[in-house]
Amino acid sequence: METPGQGYPLKVALIYGANPSGHYAAAKAVAEFLPPSIIEPVFVDLSEVYPNFGPFVAKTYLQLLSKTPAVWDYVYDNDFVALAASALRESLVPLSSNKLADLLLKRNISAVVSTQALTSVMITKNSGLARLPLFSVLTDFCAHSYWPPKGVSAYFAPEKAAADTLKEKGAPPERIFITGIPVRKEFTGPQPSKAEARKALGLSPKLFTVLITGGSRGLGNLFSAAQAIKPLLGRIQAAVLCGSNRALCRQAEKELDAKKFLRFVDFTESPALYYAAADLVVGKPGGVTLAETMALAKPFIIYSPLPGQEERNSSFLRRHKLAETAASPDRLPPLIRKHLAAPQSLALASRALAAHAHPHAARDIAAKIIQVLTGNGAE
């Protein structure tokens, strides 16, 4: 809500864990629909506010995944662990969040949009920040134990089961809105045809096209996936989105001799054209990746999901019969051959994904934020 003497545009902080990441992509998507005459978006990278903390968490996370993934899966959404963590955050978070509080207050921030749980916890537990309207945007198809149940002006959930979990944790039902996961404007509105997108990317306009993606960090054993589909190249072509994983691109250049039909793509700010060009998407089921795939109704094969949220995203897909799973690289070629032999299976998968898509989630989230901050709706 606007405070006395404060004029427009209101400064609203969009806080995410790091860039690149799905959290950042979601924050950017919401910002694209905030009218500058009313709201001035202020992007805050938590890893820059806490430069030592961010790399430590990322390094520990990746090591845990590679060495003992079962431990992470246990820790991620275990009620006992969450209870212990809540005791710690009651004492540690208010103190550790003071640096963030100083930054936001100095920048005259009027409200916060958080696309990950840690920021939401920090805001609600800091006495200097608790007065700020807080909008929490879930970027996975589940609501894990670390989202704060109180102190949030509005929660934006991807689907009903996630909203129900928030309610079970104590979040007020009237503050929970099922909007879907926000995607950027490039994934909404009219799209080029497959042939047009392929031509723009320098791909064969008529060849069956597979897009393999490892999310913003290029994770998920993508090199092995590319090796596995080499026997199909010529009948198909493939593009591999490597995200920030430049080492993967260098490895592919040295070891894979299939440049005519196989392309490894370094980090791109505009991936929508690659999705538009694809007949089939293969990859890690990160929440934003799935939302982008659904927005363009592209059939999806689950491949190399990370423990924790991506395993739960996979469960969501399987529960609604929205995707098949390639449990290992050698399972990819049979699935691709099946779709080559029966194109109608792709059409069915496309329609199922479209039925679950929320391509205008970012617009709807932005509209609710404006409504609350301008006083045109109940908080």
Image: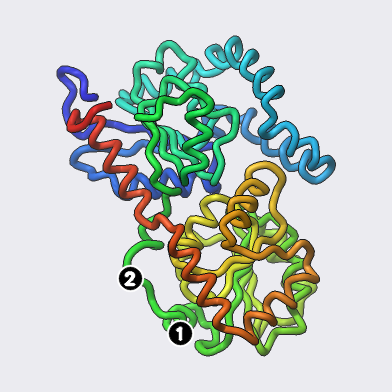
Where residue 195 is drawn, which disc sits there?
1
Dot 2 corresponds to which residue? Answer: 190
Task: Check the image and report above or below for 160 versus 206.
Answer: above
Say whether residue 127 is left or right of residue 117: left
Please tell me which residue lies in front, 168 or 303.
Answer: 168
Circle 1 crowding by C-alpha within 10 Å: few under 14, some 14–19, many from 20: some
Q: Position of residue 330 (x, y in %)?
A: 80, 71
Element carrying mark 1: helix
Residue at the location (49% across, 64% down)?
A: 353
Q: Position of residue 135 (x, y in %)?
A: 39, 32
Please tell me which residue lies in front, 160 or 190.
Answer: 160
Element carrying mark 2: loop
Please tell me which residue lies in front, 330 or 37.
Answer: 330
Please tell me which residue lies in front, 153 or 227.
Answer: 153
Q: Amino acid at mark 2?
A: Pro
Quarter of image, res 225: bottom right
Residue at the location (45% across, 48% down)?
A: 181
Task: Check the image and report above or below for 32 versus 349.
Answer: above
Task: Check the image and report above or below for 146 versus 127.
Answer: below
Residues at circles 1 and 2 in contact by the CB criterion of under 8 Å: no
Circle 2 crowding by C-alpha within 10 Å: few under 14, some 14–19, many from 20: few
Residue at the location (39% across, 49% down)?
A: 29
Quarter of the picture containing the C terminus is: top left
Separation of residues labelled 1 and 2 (CA atoms) = 15 Å
Quarter of the picture containing the N terminus is: top left
Quarter of image, res 349: bottom right
Regarding residue 327, the answer to whether it shows in the image is: yes
Q: Position of residue 287 (x, y in %)?
A: 55, 50
Where residue 122 is drawn, which disc sits there?
none
Q: Earlier in the sequence, mark 1 or mark 2?
A: 2
Residue at the location (51% across, 52% down)?
A: 288
Say whether residue 31 is left or right of residue 370: right
